[in-house]
Image (cartoon, helix red, strand yellow):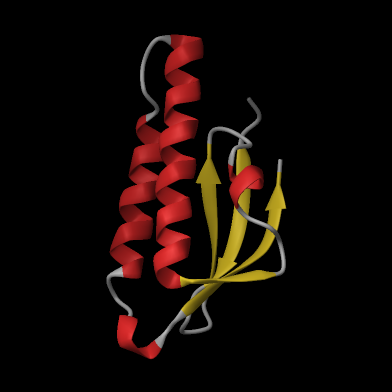
Amino acid sequence: MPETHWTVRWPDGTEEALYSPSSVVAELFTPGTAYPLPDFLHRSRIAMERASNRVAAKYGFACSSAMAQLDRIEARVAQFDMDAAPEVTCLKITQ
């Protein structure tokens, strides 16, 4: 269950490194791919929930870091106007 970082470019052009305690993000995101913001949020929720569940299965407790990352993603997503059809681009995934 290797820690994984993935870098995204938000619709405003800023780049951010995101964290997952599991490599599950590589199952849901592909470097170089742009995702409509609602799809990105949906995939992020799935990834962070799966990552937290993997930690729980191995260590007996959910991963608060995964849930905190999801909270930050949700807060960032809320800053954008959905009517503008924003996209988030996955730039890279590293383990």
Q: Between 47 and 13, which is closer to the camera in this rendering?
A: 47
Task: From this view, report whether residue 34 is shown above or below residue 69.
Answer: below
Q: Residue at x 45, y 51 (%)?
A: 44
Residue 23 can be seen in this image: yes
Is 71 left, or right, of 92 in this rendering? left
Give the x, y percent position of residue 57: 47, 13
Q: Residue at x 29, y 76 (%)?
A: 79
| Residue reaching furthest to the bottom | 84
Is 82 left, or right, of 30 in this rendering? left
Give the x, y percent position of residue 90: 62, 64
Q: Quadrant of the C terminus?
A: top right
| Numbered circles on residues, count | 0
Q: Residue at x 32, y 59 (%)?
A: 74
Q: Residue at x 64, y 44 (%)?
A: 27
Give the x, y percent position of residue 34: 60, 73
Task: From this view, report whether residue 12 is shown above or below residue 29.
Answer: below
Q: Between 13 and 33, which is closer to the camera in this rendering?
A: 33
Residue 81 can be seen in this image: no
The answer to which image quadrant residue 83 occupies is: bottom left
Q: Quadrant of the N terminus?
A: top right
Is 57 left, or right, of 32 in this rendering? left
